[in-house]
Image (cartoon, rainbow, N blue to C red):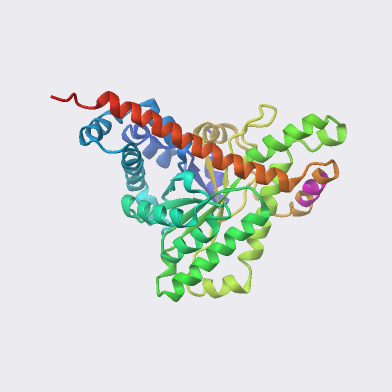
Amino acid sequence: MTDALKRLADEGVAIWLDDLSRKRITSGNLAELIDQQHVVGVTTNPSIFQKAISGGDGYEQQLTDLAARKVTVEEAVRMITTADVRDAADILRPVHEATGGQDGRVSIEVDPRLAHNTAATIAEAKQLAWLVDRPNTFIKIPATQAGLPAITEVIGLGISVNVTLIFSLERYRAVMDAYLTGLEKAKTAGLDISKIHSVASFFVSRVDTEIDKRIDKLGTDEAKALRGKAALANARLAFQAYEEVFGSDRWAALDRANANRQRPLWASTGVKDPAYKDTLYVDDLVAPGTVNTMPEATLDAVGDHGEIKGNTVAGAYEQAKADIEALASIGISYDEVVQLLEDEGVEKFAASWNDLLKSTEAELKRLAPSEA
């Protein structure tokens, strides 16, 4: 291992693990990553839980107990996932306290099938916050049109939120507006807004995957010259938008009331194209006050051969803008791509959730006590 992870943390990037399982908790692996690899947070999503629970390690006793109680499969899934998040939050609690509440957090997502239902998303977020009952958790809400008012309402209630599935710059600005509006509501209601935190999860690698596919279909030299540039350009322009919003007079008023900035979080940072360096979306997205949540393979790769050379976002805005504009010049629609990615993201998480329900239901049936 090199000291690249330490250098990354020293640059002001919070290193989070994009994975969780009961085995990772009970084996001491999560505590080890915190101690040795500078991990200061954890994100989860329906795909991660589906993989963990279908893998079976460590869940048999709880599933047996749930089967004996004849709970519904949906209740079983919520009992299992919130137990893992609660235990992970307890392991990360010292980090939470040492960072004044900023890090040491674990995220858990509302049912992804509710992504287009504002009222149900709000109700689920409140329920999850109550179920997990830890100060160092984030409730994940997708940045759909229906998610935006839910973000405002949930923040306004004093619940910390991780906004997920952000792909477009326009939507990202709407997310930041929803957060600030929520803080203003919480302040008006007399809540201590210094206790409210948020991150905005801007997805990275999926942008290159979709745009590179379109570039390869075009096949021209002009198109090929843009391979692997869209995702970084998009994320860098997102950081520029973040600097604008959190440098505004509106933010200054909240800042005086001790509000916390909504940090940009780089998500989907595992490289999917073997032609690219496996640490691309870490090395080239270094900026202070950001979070990078990585699958373990990416975390290990950065620790082994990451090249952390200081801030790789500042000063790159003009080139980023030019790269996005160049895509339009060869007939690739940015707006079409980011909307497709949002739609696909919601569908994929809903599909993973349904797979999780099916596999959990099968386990409950297998472990159900025989009727005397």
Toward the viewer: 134 or 354?
354
Query: In the image, what residue occupies the spot 63% across and 55% down?
Result: 171
Give the x, y percent position of residue 153: 47, 63
Say whether residue 312 is visible: no
Total numbered circles: 0
105 magenta-colored: no
323 magenta-colored: yes
Say whether residue 32 is visible: yes
Q: Above or below — where is 113 with respect to 63?
A: below
Q: Above or below — where is 208 with respect to 169?
A: above
Q: Is residue 87 left or right of residue 154?
A: left
Query: In the image, what residue occupies the spot 44% across and 31% down?
Result: 355
Query: In the image, what residue occupies the spot 70% across and 27% down?
Result: 275
Q: Is residue 244 left or right of residue 147?
A: right
Boundaries of the magenta span: 321-326
Q: Is residue 61 left or right of residue 97?
A: left
Query: In the image, what residue occupies the spot 40% across and 30% down?
Result: 358
Give the x, y percent position of residue 267: 56, 44
Give the x, y percent position of residue 21: 38, 34
Toward the viewer: 306 or 179?
179
Q: Above or below — where is 372 with respect to 233?
A: above
Quadrant into which the C terminus falls: top left
> Could you tell me what secondary structure mostly forms the magenta stretch?
helix
Give the x, y percent position of residue 58: 31, 30
Where residue 357 sits, quadrant-wise, is top left
Where residue 353 sits, quadrant-wise, is top left
- The residue sitting at the front extreme is 372
